[in-house]
Image (spheres, rainbow, N blue to C red):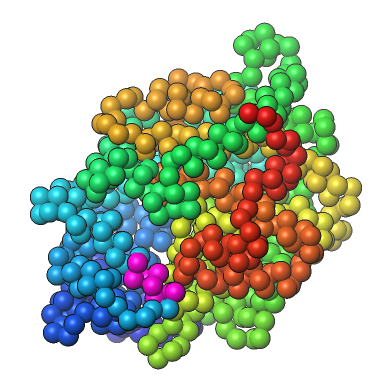
């Protein structure tokens, strides 16, 4: 038996240098982390002890471009933390708890190194003529050090170390608690009568889940492909209530997974960090590096959306209330666990349309062909599955992506279904970013989309809802941003852009979900092969704006909550649950239950990097509606328009200010008008 070698410490020798998941053992991570830190420190010592005058080339890019030896820490971190979200277990979680403070301490050691910062400062003051991309890298590097405390005195630096190390650990604990709480609950049904109203797909999926758990009957979980159909179709109001309350009270219970204190502490830690660095609030700190620039502009966007959408949302809710049976009206009216159920009934009444009618036409393998085909129609790229590329779970498919000239473009991983060790939701990530190495070779990216889509059952293949098709398109839009990256420096490539710009490519792709020309390319009945009927497509288009104002206010409410926490100037001492209900009240139309809480499961703003940035989804929606209007004018598959979008936006990453890139594509700044038109909203007078 040959001796095991740590795959992180030697060339991968895999197709396209992809991660050799099949050769990685748990103990390899810690060894590679520690060796990566040692190499990092060695490189930094070489930089600061260089007797030559600091220059852009010997100080800024010698590490940015030094692949291989110096790159080990990034290499192992990328794999470990991606799998911590997509395929974790108790041993991985324990290692994360051990390694996270070591990594945070190392990051602080780098950013707070006075000798390294002095060299960077000298280059920032005195440098050769730089290209726009080089200038952006230098500015980002200098600003990154300053925003990480490089200008603080020693007492300030020590305080910052303590705050960031604690915040890092609490963010990790938040995520681990949420995963454990979500996976711990299940609704076990043994009486078939309690399945009343549920479509066959939901019953089959629940039966399969029960079988996988060694149970009789049917099991429903808090994963969206299980939770959502139950809330939409089940006639069992008490069971809907049970499931709703389970999902909306996770991490509030009196146990080790309670996140209330963690959230409060994270809010205060971030405020203290911002104030230590000279900002009034954490939002002020964050927004300095965002398109929105300041809290005033964020609140203007959110308030404009409330003004524009709330009157319509009120009408939508009144119409929904009129569908309620009299007994429920007498019992106090609609409760939160009734909303999806009666919304579905109203949709059926108005449009004779629901997701189960469409599901047979959205077989996953055809959706994959459709999404890949869309990329081919727009950009000429092609996808070929390569089973020789190692994957981290059998659910994951790996593809080679080729550009329109036949050259290799990227590796694309797709991870489709929920499972025990996987966080909920959907996201795009990378196992390797794009950059140009010292030899001039364009190192191509390895991008991955991770989703929680409906699983196949013993009787049926994976049949998706229209909403899941939109989710796929959304994450695929992010992946195109990564795959088309064509910059010199990895830290500026792909999705390394300001966070209120990063959602443009993803939300832009969602527009195609209801376009007849696109649906015609892949939406075929999984049994008969018949195309999605024109009449159904017409109903999809007609119903596009069904409850659109309500959905908008929901997103705005999350933005208001986010800003309420991160515009705090003094210690946050309020109780989370009542504070939450007050913070987003002006965007909430329904009843707020005293025990439910969003904050404790709001990963985006507590552990996912969107703190003081959740407004970005609505900000980018203005951009995506405006951008897609160009395609609607020129043709939704117009290759010239697509090439311009690729050249001016998708391939440029963060090499220039995002508004500069957008205006170069669009010819001017966006307005809210295209979004209002798309949603059928008439602008009201203020």
Q: Where is residue 191 in the image (x, y as percent from the top left)?
A: 62, 29
Residue drawn at x 53%, y 38% as measured from the top left: 300
> Residue at the spot x=57%, y=45% of the render?
618
Residue at the outermost top position: 330
Residue toward you, 610 or 154: 154
Q: Is residue 134 magenta?
A: yes
Vertically, is 650 above or below 55? above
Q: Which quadrant holds residue 469?
A: bottom right
Q: Residue at x 19, y 50 (%)?
A: 160
Q: Which quadrant: the C terminus?
A: top right
Residue 388, image x and y in percent?
Answer: 52, 80
Reply above or below: 654 against 506: below
Is 293 in front, or is 144? 293
Nearer to us in this view, 275 or 111? 275
Residue 387 seen anywhere in this rendered image of the structure: no
State left or right for residue 665 relative to residue 391.
right
Residue 203 horizontal side relative to residue 30, left or right: right
What range is drawn magenta here?
132-139
One can see residue 153 in this view: yes
Using the rendered view, name the quadrant where residue 122 is placed: bottom left
Name which residue lies at 76% across and 29% down: 346
The magenta stretch spans residue 213: no
Residue 118 screen position, x and y as percent: 18, 69
Mark count = 0
Q: Quadrant of residue 239?
A: top right
- Magenta-highlighted stretch: main secondary structure? helix
In the rendered image, the quadrant that contains the N terminus is bottom left
Whole-percent x and y of residue 285? Answer: 34, 48
């Amino acid at each position: 038996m040959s001796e095991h070698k740590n795959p992180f410490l030697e060339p991968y020798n895999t197709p396209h240098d992809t991660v050799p998941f099949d050769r990685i053992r748990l103990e390899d991570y810690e060894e590679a982390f520690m060796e990566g830190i040692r190499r990092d420190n060695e490189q930094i010592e070489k930089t600061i002890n260089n007797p030559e005058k600091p220059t852009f080339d010997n100080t800024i890019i010698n590490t940015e471009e030094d692949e291989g030896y110096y790159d080990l820490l990034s290499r192992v971190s990328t794999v470990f933390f991606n799998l911590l979200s997509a395929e974790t277990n108790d041993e991985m979680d324990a290692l994360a708890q051990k390694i996270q403070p070591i990594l945070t301490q190392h990051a602080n050691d780098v950013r707070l190194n006075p000798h390294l910062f002095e060299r960077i400062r000298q280059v920032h003051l005195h440098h050769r003529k730089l290209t726009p991309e080089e200038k952006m890298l230098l500015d980002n590097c200098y600003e990154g050090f300053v925003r990480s405390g490089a200008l603080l005195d020693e007492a300030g630096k020590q305080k910052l170390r303590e705050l960031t190390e604690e915040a890092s650990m609490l963010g990790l604990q938040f995520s681990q608690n949420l995963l454990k709480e979500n996976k711990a609950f299940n609704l076990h049904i043994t009486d078939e009568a309690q399945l009343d109203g549920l479509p066959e797909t939901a019953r089959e999926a629940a039966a399969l889940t029960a079988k996988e758990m060694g149970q009789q009957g049917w099991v429903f979980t808090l994963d969206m492909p299980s939770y959502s159909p139950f809330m939409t179709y089940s006639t069992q109001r008490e069971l809907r209530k049970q499931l709703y309350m389970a999902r909306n009270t996770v991490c509030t219970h009196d146990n080790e997974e309670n996140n209330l204190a963690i959230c409060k502490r994270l809010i205060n830690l971030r405020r203290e960090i911002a104030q230590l660095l000279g900002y009034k609030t954490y939002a002020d700190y964050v927004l300095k590096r965002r398109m929105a620039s300041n809290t005033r502009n964020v609140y203007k966007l959110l308030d404009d959306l409330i003004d524009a959408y709330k009157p319509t949302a009120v009408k939508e809710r009144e119409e929904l209330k009129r569908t309620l049976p009299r007994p429920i009206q007498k019992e106090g009216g609609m409760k939160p666990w009734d909303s999806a159920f009666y919304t579905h009934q109203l949709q059926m009444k108005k449009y004779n349309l629901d997701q189960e009618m469409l599901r047979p036409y959205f077989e996953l393998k055809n959706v994959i062909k459709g999404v890949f085909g869309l990329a081919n129609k727009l950009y000429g790229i092609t996808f070929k599955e390569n089973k020789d590329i190692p994957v981290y779970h059998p659910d994951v498919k790996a593809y080679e992506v080729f550009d329109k000239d036949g050259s290799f473009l990227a590796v694309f991983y797709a991870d489709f279904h929920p499972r025990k060790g996987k966080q909920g939701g959907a996201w795009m990530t990378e196992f390797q970013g794009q950059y140009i190495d010292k030899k001039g070779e364009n190192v191509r990216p390895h991008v991955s989309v991770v989703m929680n889509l409906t699983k196949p059952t013993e009787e049926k293949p994976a049949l998706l809802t229209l909403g899941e098709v939109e989710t796929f398109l959304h994450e695929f839009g992010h992946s195109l941003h990564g795959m088309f990256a064509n910059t010199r420096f990895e830290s500026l490539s792909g999705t390394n852009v300001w966070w209120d710009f990063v959602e443009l490519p993803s939300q832009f792709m969602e527009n195609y979900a209801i376009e007849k020309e696109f649906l015609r390319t892949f939406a075929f009945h999984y049994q008969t092969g018949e195309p999605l009927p024109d009449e159904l497509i017409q109903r999809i288009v007609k119903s596009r704006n069904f409850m659109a104002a309500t959905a908008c206010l929901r997103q705005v409410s999350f933005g208001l909550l986010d800003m309420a926490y991160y515009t705090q100037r003094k210690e946050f001492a309020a109780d989370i649950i009542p504070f939450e209900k007050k913070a987003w009240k002006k965007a909430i139309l329904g009843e707020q239950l005293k025990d439910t809480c969003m904050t404790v499961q709001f990963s985006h703003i507590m552990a996912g990097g969107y703190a003081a940035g959740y407004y970005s989804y609505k900000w980018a929606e203005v951009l995506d509606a405006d951008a897609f209007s160009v395609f609607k004018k020129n043709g939704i598959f117009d290759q010239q328009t697509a090439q311009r979008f690729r050249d001016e936006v998708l391939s440029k990453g963060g090499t220039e200010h995002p508004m500069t890139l957008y205006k170069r594509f669009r010819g001017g700044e966006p307005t809210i008008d295209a979004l209002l038109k798309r949603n059928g909203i008439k602008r009201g007078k203020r």
